[in-house]
Every structure is written in C-alpha cells, then in structure tokens.
Amino acid sequence: MVQTRWIRNHTDQTVKHRSNKIYRLDSLGNRWSSAAIERKISRAKAEKIEQLTDEFGRVVCQACKRNDCVPVDMAHIISVDKCKNDPRFNLELAWDLDNLIPLGRPCHAKADNNNIRWTNIKN
Ligand SMILES: [Zn+2]
C-alpha cells in the first residue's frame, strides 16, 4: 500500500507535504504554495491595471478619485490574509480581478484601518 505524501490539516485549508512544506487548497482542491499564490496575485494586479488602463486610459484612486492620491496601489477588497486563512472565503479570491480595487496610498491606509466602507467605494 502506498502511503500518501500529503497530510491534510484539520482546518481543511492547508495540506502539508511530507517535506513539511505547507500548501493551501483552493475550492477545487488544487494545492498552492505561498510562492505560487504570490505569483498569481502579481499577475492579477498587472492584468487589472492593464484592464483599467484600456478602459479608462488611466488608473485612479477609486475612494476619492483625486489625481493627486498617489501612488495608486492595487488593493484587495477581501484581504489576502482572509482568502488564505478564513474558511468563509475561497483561496482563489486572492487573485480574482473583481477582488482588486485601485486605491491611492493615503486612501489605502485609511481603508486598512476600516475608515472607508467598501460599499461606498464600489457604488
Ligand atoms: Zn484616494
């Protein structure tokens, strides 16, 4: 009998390879290393910037819409931490373009402190 090389974590959010490397599971059960997740997120951010530039000609802070709210970051509406660790969210939300929003650094900092309600930004 072949012993499994994968040890499923009790939270069902991660699996550990026998090499002790931790992988996270997406909703389809695919395994993702931290490095692979970071690469997916980087690509999603680049793609989102390209999409917004194509559509609007530029990328502007969606919280205040001011041209001087810079630099503009691609912020997560549902944080990467929640995507990775909160069982209510699928891992793949971390690289879902709809979960990314351009925010200037000043507004991004406020959003991270929950001073901006996301619903206000999206409407
Ligand atoms: Zn702003």
Image: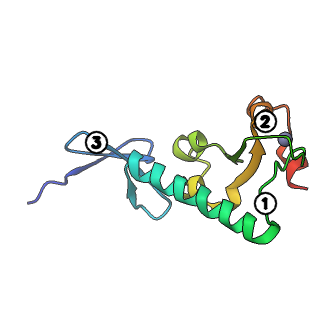
Task: Point out the frontmost of discs 3 and 2.
Answer: 2
Disc assigned to residue 58: 1
Tag 3, which secondary structure?
Answer: loop
Q: Residue at x 28, y 42 (%)?
A: 21
Indicate the position of residue 68 as horizontal and vertical percent values: 86, 41
Residue located beneath label 2 in the image = 111
Q: Residue at x 70, y 61 (%)?
A: 98
Indicate the position of residue 114 as horizontal and vertical percent values: 80, 32
Disc assigned to residue 21: 3
- Contact, mark 3 vs mark 2 (Cβ under 8 Å): no
Tag 1, which secondary structure?
Answer: loop
| First in sequence: mark 2 vs mark 1 | 1
- Crowdedness near tag 1: few (<14), some (14–19) or many (≥20) residues, C-alpha within 10 Å: few
Separation of marks 3 and 2 at Cα, in angstroms: 33 Å
> In the figure, 116 relative to 63: above or below?
above
> In the figure, 36 relative to 85: above or below?
below
- Crowdedness near tag 3: few (<14), some (14–19) or many (≥20) residues, C-alpha within 10 Å: few
Q: Is 42 left, or right, of 74 in this rendering?
A: left
Q: Amino acid at mark 2?
A: Ala
| First in sequence: mark 1 vs mark 3 | 3
Task: Point out the frontmost of discs 2 and 1.
Answer: 1
Residue nearest the viewer, comparing 8 with 33: 33
> In the figure, 26 relative to 121: above or below?
below
Does the residue tagged 2 have its C-beta within 8 Å of any atom of ligand 1? Answer: no
Report the residue that reaches farthest toward the left.
1
> In the figure, 71 relative to 55: above or below?
above
Residue nearest the viewer, comparing 74 with 113: 74
Indicate the position of residue 41 as horizontal and vertical percent values: 54, 53
Q: Amino acid at mark 1?
A: Arg
